[in-house]
Amino acid sequence: MDDSVRKPVAVVTGASSGIGEATARRLAAEGFSVVAAARRRDRLDALVAEIGGTAVTLDVREPESVAALAAAVPVCAVLVNNAGGARGLAPIAEADAEHWRWMYEVNVLGTMLVTKALLPALLASGNGHIVSINSVAGHEAYDGGGGYTAAKHAQNALLLTLRLELLGQPIRVTEVCPGLVETEFSLVRFDGDEERASSVYEGLQPLVAADVADCIAWAVTRPEHVNIDRIDVKPRAQATATRVARDA
Ligand code: NAP
């Protein structure tokens, strides 16, 4: 029998890297048939060759691409809206409108488009679960973070609205808000500047992507009447978005 017939299906967006990739691995280990979606297809193919499931090329900014994902997934137990990220760290006085547009499109509109497209499949599962990978930036402001914090606050508002609108339906809604996680996030934020990216994690032990995947796996494996609303997870050396303890 085909994997997807026997196992509940979990769609993970942004599965080509970081938290999404670790989540795809972990959910496969938990018994899900994983649909791994992102733009970098070569990485997805390598991933599903290891963990099983299906690779789907997806750009969350493109409605046709999202529609193709939904067409490939008639029944979905878990949707992890993880695709996202930050561009730049400029103060608002020097804001780059293209960076802001990218952050809003990927984190906010992308989450809306994918969620909207997969809602029928989540309902069809009889026990759906939407997990949104937000951030400490969804609940705090910090210098230079305006474009990212605005997008992540909006992503939070989207999820709170969704929880109200889905009340009474068999779909759970969970927000996961990590602090510093060492992934390709800072490399993307700083446009490939490896030195600047690695300085973000210097002198402290950040989370690794598998730590966040562990939280997601825990939330989606609770009994179906239990809704984990929100998980805030940071390294021990981090108190707020910017307040960290670094080694001397
Ligand atoms: P990452 O390693 O850069 O991964 C980002 C993922 O998003 C990649 O798989 C990328 O895949 C995908 N993505 C980007 N644009 C996309 C698009 N238009 N369509 C489809 N997929 C797209 O960073 P990460 O840390 O794992 O980030 C995952 C999520 O965690 C993001 O929402 C981020 O905001 C959040 N987060 C990260 C941290 C952190 O410190 N790392 C902290 C809090 C929250 P492709 O490029 O192949 O499309």
Image: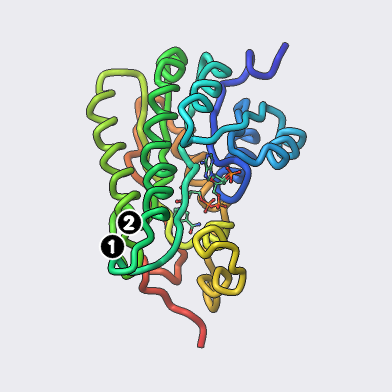
| Residue type highlighted by circle 1 | Ala
Task: Quickly name the residue at label 2.
Answer: 149
Between 70 and 246, which is closer to the camera in this rendering? 70
Give residue 29's quadrant in the image: top right
Between 150 and 28, which is closer to the camera in this rendering? 150
Question: In the rendering, at what x and y percent does residue 90 appear?
Answer: 38, 68
Quadrant placement of the N terminus: top right
Q: Give the CA separation, mark 1 to mark 2.
A: 6 Å
Between 236 and 71, which is closer to the camera in this rendering? 71
Q: Earlier in the sequence, mark 1 or mark 2?
A: 1
Give residue 202's quadrant in the image: bottom right
Task: Quickly name the residue at label 1.
Answer: 141
Can the viewer see residue 147 in this picture?
A: yes
Question: In the rendering, at what x and y percent does residue 63 appear?
Answer: 46, 27
As drawn, 119 above or below 221: above
Measuring 48% from the left and 80% from the top, which residue is drawn there? 246
Q: Note whether ligand 1 is within 8 Å of mark 1.
A: no
State left or right for residue 186 relative to residue 223: right
Q: Are marks 1 and 2 in contact (CB under 8 Å)?
A: yes
Q: Residues within 10 Å of mark 2 (few under 14, many from 20)?
A: many
As drawn, 144 above or below 97: below
Measuring 47% from the left and 33% from the top, which residue is drawn there? 220
As drawn, 77 above or below 12: above
Question: In the rendering, at what x and y percent does residue 135 appear?
Answer: 39, 53
Q: Secondary structure at mark 1?
A: loop
Q: Residues within 10 Å of mark 1 (few under 14, many from 20)?
A: some
